[in-house]
Image (spheres, rainbow, N blue to C red):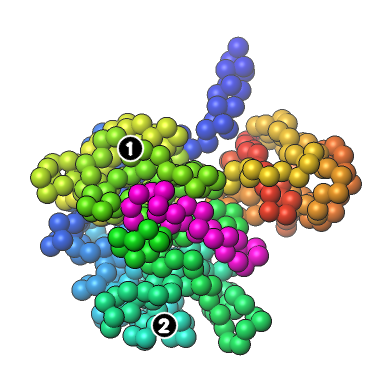
Amino acid sequence: MKKYCSFTALLALLAMPALAQNPVVVVTSDFQIGSVALLDPGASAARKDLLTIHSDAVVRYHAGRIYVVNRLGQDNILVLDPANPGTPLLQFSVGNGSNPQDIEFASEQKAYVSRNNSAALLVVDPRTGEFLREIDLSAFADADGLPEQAEMALVGNRLYLACQRLDRDAGWVSSESVLVAVDVTTDQVVDWDPAQDGVQALRLQSVNPGNLIAIGSRLFVAQTGQYGVADGGVEVVDLDKGLSLGLVLGEAALEGDLTALALVSAVKGYAVVSGADFSNSVRPVDLATGQAGAPLAGHSGGYTPDLKIDGNRLIVADRGTFSDPSRAGLLIYDAATGALVAGPLDVGLPPAGIAVLGDNQTTAVEEESAIRPALTTLGAAYPNPFNASTLIPLAVGEGTAPISLAVYDTLGRRVRTLVSGGVFAGPQTLSWDGRDDQGQVVGSGAYVVELRVGGWRQQRKLLLLK
């Protein structure tokens, strides 16, 4: 009986690999001062006012360190230890008046800082704050000479940077926003269109990009567009092909301006929407159908600058309203159903930004697309969980294009390529021995095996136990 119960529990863990909660760090602000708060796993109350910071800050997490990006007026980055966030480990400038927006990590020794008031992307050593170099982006600036660098995302060896291109001399309006790619092994800007002269960026379908979310080889770009105009939405970029698939969700369906996005999978997520009266709501979104659901219950309608997914939790930064500031705090929802679980949880000052403290948290994975090649399918691996090797059933239809079958970790990194190219039609079974492409044994944990045929994908979850 004990073995049966244990195996059942493992199956439940495999089906819901993200139930474990991670600590959450929150930067807060009343627009005059800011502070840091921490919400521990399972806690019903946050630890508040742990450190005074700038009133305009965002927060990131990487490899056991918290990074507070103090924006315009402070122009520096604070590095904190989650175990003792009240005492900074390091604080370093990123250039006076540069207005940093984001920090993204290529390695423990190398990070990139996007700066809204600079035409150069900064490369630093995050251990010391030492400037390593600057990457000139002036070729992507608009008439005011600045590209207005915003959020970034790292996929493989490429860094993707959203440039809003807001013309400061014409009312901060953008006529064209772009996505710039940088090879992090050489720090050279990548040309999206070699057929044209010069180094090209990817022109986005709308303007004013905000969140960049990478899932597999696709990048999801949340774009606000022009405020009060239904011209923004969520754009999908196929990074393998180097092209945009267009806006898959528009602001007409959202009934307002898209200001923040969090994804549970490649087709499901949640969006913060600013209505015509500037009230905010959080709505479930379906990128496969281009539709949005009804606003989630329990939200104050006040300004909501951030939301994050932590496993099965949706965490929302609700700043409350002028008429009822007591409703400010974190709202915790069930990410699968949208049901309110807890909140508002007091974090001191109103919340301004959220980071989940989890290097190994399960990230959103791509779901099966609607159009499947005839008779082609990926079966459920067995045994699963496994501790030595697992068998992966595969059926390939007649006339199917070359396929790819690969194993990824929960951060979306390719671990092992099992098949790449043409295979015989019909049923077959492949094996994965728990080793990567270099023959090294990988660690215990959750993995994803993905079948690709052209633009169609199907995934199955694996659990390796040692």
Quarter of the image that includes the N terminus: top right
Q: Is residue 17 left or right of residue 63?
A: right
Give the crowd class for mark 2: few <14, some 14-19, many >=20 residues within 10 Å.
many
Quarter of the image that includes the C terminus: top right
Residue 206 rendering spot, x and y as whole percentages:
44, 66
Query: Does the magenta run of residues contain 166?
Result: no
Which residue type carries mark 2?
Ala
| Disc number placed over residue 296 in the picture, else none | 1
Per the model, the C-alpha gap separating discs 2 and 1 is 39 Å
Q: SS at mark 1?
A: loop
Number of labelled discs?
2
Query: Does the magenta run of residues contain 238?
Result: yes
In the image, residue 436 above or below residue 131: above
Residue at the image position 57 percent from the left and 17 percent from the top: 5
Which residue occupies the foreground of this view, 202 or 68? 202
Residue 365 rendering spot, x and y as whole percentages:
56, 46
Q: Which residues are magenta?
A: 233-257
Which image quarter: residue 51? Answer: bottom left
Q: Is residue 195 visible?
A: yes
**Is the magenta region chiefly helix, strand or loop?**
strand
Which image quarter: residue 196? Answer: bottom right
Which residue type carries mark 1?
Leu
Residue at the image position 57 percent from the left and 83 percent from the top: 199
| Disc number placed over residue 402 in the picture, else none | none
Which residue occupies the foreground of this view, 72 or 207? 207
Q: Residue furthest right?
A: 424
Give the crowd class for mark 1: few <14, some 14-19, many >=20 residues within 10 Å.
some
Q: Give the mark, 2 or 1, whose residue is nearer the N terminus.
A: 2
Residue 69 rendering spot, x and y as whole percentages:
31, 65
Q: Which residue is mark 2?
A: 141
| Residue contact between numbered discs 2 and 1, judged by CB atoms under 8 Å | no
